[in-house]
Image (cartoon, rainbow, N blue to C red):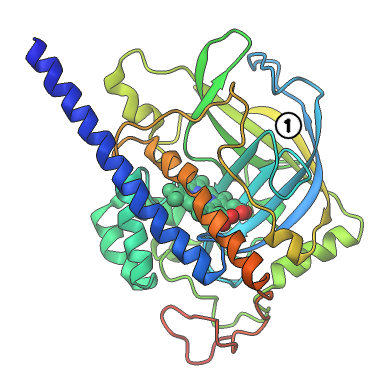
Amino acid sequence: MIEHKFILALVALFDRWVLALVTFAVTLIISANSFFGKKRMSHENGIALRGRLRIAADARMPEHDFFEQGRTFACRIRHGAASFTDDAKLVVRSASIKFADSRSKSPMDILMNTGRMPLFWNARTFVQFMLRSMAGKGKEYVPYLRAHPPAAIGGGDGVRRDPVSPHRLVYQTQTTSGFIGRDKVFRYARYRLVPVPFDGEESGLPDEWDRNHAWLQNPLFNETRNRNYLKDATRELLASGEVMRYMLQIQLRLPPPDDTLQPEWIAADVPWDETMFPYLDLAALDVSEALSYKEGVLTWFDLCHHPKSLPIPKARSIDDAHSLNHLRLAGIWATRARLLSYRLTGVPPAFPDSRQAKDWKGLPPMAKPP
Ligand code: HEM
C-alpha cells in the first residue's frame, strides 16, 4: 500500500515536471515570436472599445463579493480575430473584457472566443496545434485535425465569416475557472458574452462548406470590402452615437463527486448541458466609444487579473484541462516581450487596407486577392 502511494507520488511529480518543461518551451517560443514579430502571439487583428459594465446578476446566482448587484465599472473590450490580418477571412473571433478603463491594470479580465469548443483542450494538444501553425497554417492543419476529430469540430464551430458587427456574435471562455461565493462553496464557472437583445441566433455563422473546411480561411473570391472593413464599420457605428449592448453571462457547476469524473467536467472541448447548467445573466455591458489604433495596441489582457474568489485552478499535467490556463498565465511573458519591442523600436503601423500589400497572405495562395 505504501509502495503504491509512493509510485503515485512519483508519477504526479513527473507529470508536473513535464508540464513545467512544456510551459517553459512554449513560453520561450511565443515570447520570441511576439518580440521579433512585434505583434500579439494571437489575435493581432483587433479593435479596442470603451464602455460601462453594470453587475445585473440573475436572482438564481449565489451571492458573490466581486459580482455585487448594481456595482459598476468603467471598462474596455477588445474585439480581435485569432489569426490573419484581414477582417474578411474565415476566423475565430474574440471579445476580451477588462473591468477597468485602463491599458493593463484591472481587478478582472475575461478572454473569450467564438464557438463552444476550442481547437485544443490541454497543453499537449495546444503544442501539436502550435507546431502546425508554425509549419504554415492552412493545409498544414489537416493532419492535426484528422488525428483529433474534436479539434476539427471545434475549428468548424468557432470560425465566423462576414458578421454584421462584433456585437452580434456570441463569445465563450471555453475553459473553466473557479467561483467561490459568499457561501464559501467552490464551483466551476464558464462565461459567455451575448448580444442584447439575444434570440439565440448570432451573426457570421459558417455555412456547411466553411464549417467542414475551417482551415481554408481566405476571403471569398467576390469579396469587395477591404481588410479593415469591420473595424472601420465599428468605428463609424459608434461615432454615429449608437451604443453596442451586450450581456455577460455565467454558467456554474459544482465539482464532481469523484475525481475520476474531473476530466469530463472541466474539459474545454466538452460544453456543459445548458438545460442543467443554464447561463445566468451577470453584467450588462454598454459600449459607446472606439479607442485609437495605438491605444488598442497598448491595451492587453491577462488571466491573472482576477479576485481571489474567482481563482484559476492549478494544473497537474499536460493532459489536465487546466493546463491550457496554466500556459496562458505564463503567456504574460509573450505580452511583456511584445510591449518591450514597442518600447525599443516603437509601435508598428496599422496594416494596410489592400490585399496587394506584401504582408497579406493567402492560404492557399490567391493569384488575384480580392
Ligand atoms: C481556449 C483557450 C484560449 C482562449 C479562449 C484564448 C483567448 C484569447 C484571446 C481572446 C486573446 C486576445 C486578447 C486581446 O484582445 O488582446 C488571446 C491572446 C493571446 N493568447 Fe490566448 N486563448 C486561449 C489559449 C491560449 C493558450 C493555450 C496560450 C498559450 C500560451 C495563449 C496565449 C495567448 C497570447 C500570448 C496572446 C496575446 C497576448 C498579448 O500579446 O497581448 N492563449 N487569447
Residue at image coords 70%, 23%? 67
Q: Secondary structure at mark 1?
A: strand
User: In the shown orientation, is residue 20 left or right of residue 337?
Assistant: left
Mark 1 residue crowding within 10 angstroms, few (<14) / some (14–19) / many (20+): many
Judged from this view, the residue extending furthest toward the front is 344
Q: Is residue 33 above or below residue 115?
A: below
Q: Residue furthest right?
A: 241
Above or below: residue 350 compared with residue 14: below
Q: Quadrant of the N terminus?
A: top left
Q: Which of 188 and 237 lies nearest the eye of the viewer?
A: 188
Q: Which residue is mark 1?
A: 283
- At 64% from the left and 73% from the top, the residue drawn is 345
Residue 334 appears in the picture as rendered: yes
Q: Is residue 201 left or right of residue 261?
A: right
Quarter-wise, where is residue 98 in the image?
Answer: top right
- 241 and 296: which one is in front? 296
The residue lying at 56 percent from left, 27 percent from top is: 251
State the residue at coordinates (41%, 53%).
27
Quarter location, residue 85: bottom right
Q: Residue furthest top?
A: 183
Q: Is residue 278 visible?
A: no
- Residue 291 at x, y percent in the picture: 80, 59
Q: Point out residue 173 in the picture as x, y percentages from the top left corner.
A: 54, 40
Where is residue 316 shown, x and y percent of the image?
A: 32, 31
How many numbered marks are there?
Answer: 1
Q: Is residue 339 left or right of residue 130?
A: right
Q: Is residue 298 above or below residue 99?
A: below
Residue 216 in the image, given as x and y percentages of width and height? 43, 71
Q: Is mark 1 within 8 Å of ligand 1?
A: no
What's the amino acid at mark 1?
Ala
- The quarter of the rendered structure image containing the C terminus is bottom right
